């Protein structure tokens, strides 16, 4: 009887262990499938962003002499009584390109900008970090990321730094928030 009980116990133990191993394999398979699905979704999102980026205009010039360009804008701003809007970022930055495209393709925003600002795309990229120019404005990209906006008055004095995340809405920008931002920093405000 003891032998029978021992055999029954061992058989039961093997069966339980076998179920645990099978269950563990099933769980590993489920986890693996979840990880694979997540990786596929991330790759798809990256591909879509790359396709979008390829289609958007590239307003940043890594070869530009930003310091000289901004000095020319300051001279012009005084004559035209306009502030200077510097959009800092690079052609590598999807949000920078989205913002530029949003402003250029939204007639209401384009008119607001054209009527009130001299607009400049200050490049930040491995090819040209414009460290000297950025340091004059406290390196706002280090604090806020890109794009970041630097508003200068018509005399070239920095009057505002604006991170872009507060202007976002979904995968783009809010018309009302961007419009309010531009209206807040005109030379006529």
Image: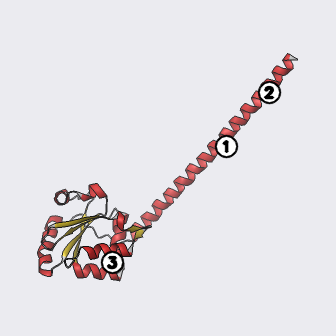
- Name the residue carrying label 2: 11
Tell me the SS state at disc 3: helix
Give the quarter of the image for residue 151. bottom left
Q: Which residue is mark 1?
A: 26
Q: How many marks?
A: 3
Q: Residue at x 20, y 79 (%)?
A: 188
Could you tell me which secondary element the residue under label 1 belongs to?
A: helix
Element on which disc 2 rests:
helix
**Label 1 – label 3 distance at C-alpha:** 53 Å
Residue 62 percent across, percent down from the top left: 24, 63
For label 3, count other residues whose C-alpha is less than 10 Å away and answer few (under 14), some (14-19) or many (20+). some
* Quadrant of the drawing holding the C terminus: bottom left
Mark nearer the N terminus (3 vs 2): 2
In the rendered structure, the answer to whether residue 149 lies left or right of residue 6 reads left
Say which label, 1 or 3, has the lower sequence index. Answer: 1
In this rendering, the answer to whether 115 lies above or below 15 is below
- Find out whether the residues at labels 2 and 1 contact each other: C-beta distance under 8 Å: no
């Amino acid at each position: 009887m003891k032998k029978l009980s021992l055999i029954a116990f061992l058989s039961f133990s093997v069966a339980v262990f076998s179920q645990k191993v099978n269950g563990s394999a099933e769980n590993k398979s489920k986890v693996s499938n979840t990880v694979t699905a997540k990786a596929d979704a991330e790759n798809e999102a990256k591909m879509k962003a790359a396709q979008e980026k390829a289609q958007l205009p590239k307003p940043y010039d890594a070869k530009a002499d930003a310091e000289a360009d901004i000095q020319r804008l300051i001279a012009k701003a005084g004559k035209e009584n306009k502030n200077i809007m510097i959009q800092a970022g690079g052609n590598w930055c999807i949000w920078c390109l989205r913002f530029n495209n949003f402003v250029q393709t939204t007639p209401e925003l384009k008119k607001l900008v054209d009527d009130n600002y001299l607009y400049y795309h200050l490049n930040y990229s491995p090819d040209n970090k414009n460290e000297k120019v950025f340091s004059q404005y406290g390196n706002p990209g280090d604090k806020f990321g890109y794009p970041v906006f630097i508003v200068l008055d018509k005399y070239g004095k920095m009057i505002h730094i604006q991170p872009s995340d507060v202007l976002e809405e979904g995968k783009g920008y809010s018309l009302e928030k961007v419009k309010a931002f531009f209206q807040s920093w005109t030379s006529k405000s």
